[in-house]
Image (cartoon, rainbow, N blue to C red):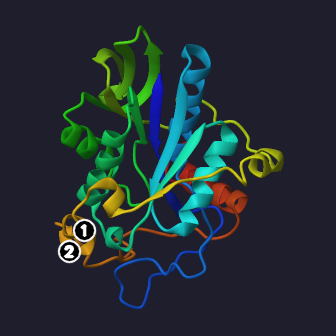
Amino acid sequence: MEILVCVKRVPDTAENEFELNSAGNDLDRDDLVYSVNEWDNYAVEEAIQIVDNAGGSVTVVTVGDDESEEVLRREMAMGANNGVLLSDDAFEGSDGKGIAAILKAEVEKGKYDLILTGAQADEGAGQVGGMLAAMLDYPYASLVNKIEVKDDSSIHVGREIEGGNQEMNEIQLPCVLSIQTGINEPRYVGIRGIRKVASVDVPVKGAGDLGIDPAAVGKDGAKTRRVDYFVPDLGDGAEMLEGSTEEIIEKLIEKLKAKGGL
């Protein structure tokens, strides 16, 4: 089975102190530490496990600048067979639809049975997987927490739904799935693995290589734009607990006890 996993380089929430930029429409990203999007990491692990059992190969792809190559190499060190970087000045400022259009062009250049994305990324919209499936006219399932390969033409997919219930669906291949965290336990990536793929060629494709009209993506092609980005004011009765994680937990428990919650 040939699997393509769409990944993204995002700010690492465990390593950064976040502040807004001077324009008030984004984070100040100058000194942030980046890593692979958590949801995407689960998608890559699932793809590797499927290929281990059913055969085939895993390709990871990302839309970004030169620094995004480190995310591809990290996932290749994890076990993905190939990486592709989609990078062009024309892609900068793309909204969700623009990113999906760029990924669609890459999917159509290959021959993939299964396309995986994370359920969401750092901006929390959770829209690229669904848009990509719609543009390709492929079946789609979101919040997937179980995949069973049945044969060369279909898979069984488990989804988390409202009320803590689980549903199973049979989906024809090729298809697009958005993967939920908890579907597996992503494997550890060591220095040896990273060194092993350090010299592996990672092709870089721009708008011309993909046959994309630059005006259809990037800022010019974006149908949505962020106009504000802010920390909400505290509501009436809200209180922010400060201190270490352990201290915050202790304070929270005491408050819950005082309110009759425990």
Secondary structure state at the residue bearing disc 2: helix
Amino acid, disc 1 = Pro
Furthest residue to the left?
223
Q: Quadrant of residue 107?
A: top left
Q: Is residue 145 left or right of residue 32?
A: left
Furthest residue to the bottom?
22
**Considering only vertical position in the picture, is 81 above or below 54?**
below
**Considering only vertical position in the picture, is 257 above or below 1?**
below
- Of pointers 2 and 1, the one earlier in the residue sequence: 1
Q: Quadrant of residue 136?
A: top left
Q: Which residue is mark 2?
A: 220
Query: Taking the image as drawn, is residue 261 in sight?
Result: no
Which residue sits at x=50%, y=37%? 43
- Quadrant that contains the C terminus: top right
Measure the alpha-carbon separation of dots 2 and 1.
8 Å
Which residue sits at x=42%, y=8%? 150
- Dot 1: within a 10 Å radius of its alpha carbon, few (fewer than 14), some, or many (20 or more) residues? some
Q: x, y (%) of residue 18? A: 54, 75
| Residue 45: mark | none
State how many labels appear.
2
- Dot 2: within a 10 Å radius of its alpha carbon, few (fewer than 14), some, or many (20 or more) residues? some
Q: x, y (%) of residue 21? A: 44, 85
Secondary structure state at the residue bearing disc 1: helix
Q: Is residue 233 left or right of residue 187?
A: left
Q: Quadrant of residue 163?
A: top left
Which residue sits at x=28%, y=78%? 228
Q: Which residue is mark 1?
A: 214
Amino acid, disc 2 = Asp
Q: x, y (%) of residue 197? A: 71, 48
Q: Is residue 36 left or right of residue 219?
A: right
Q: Is residue 36 left or right of residue 211?
A: right
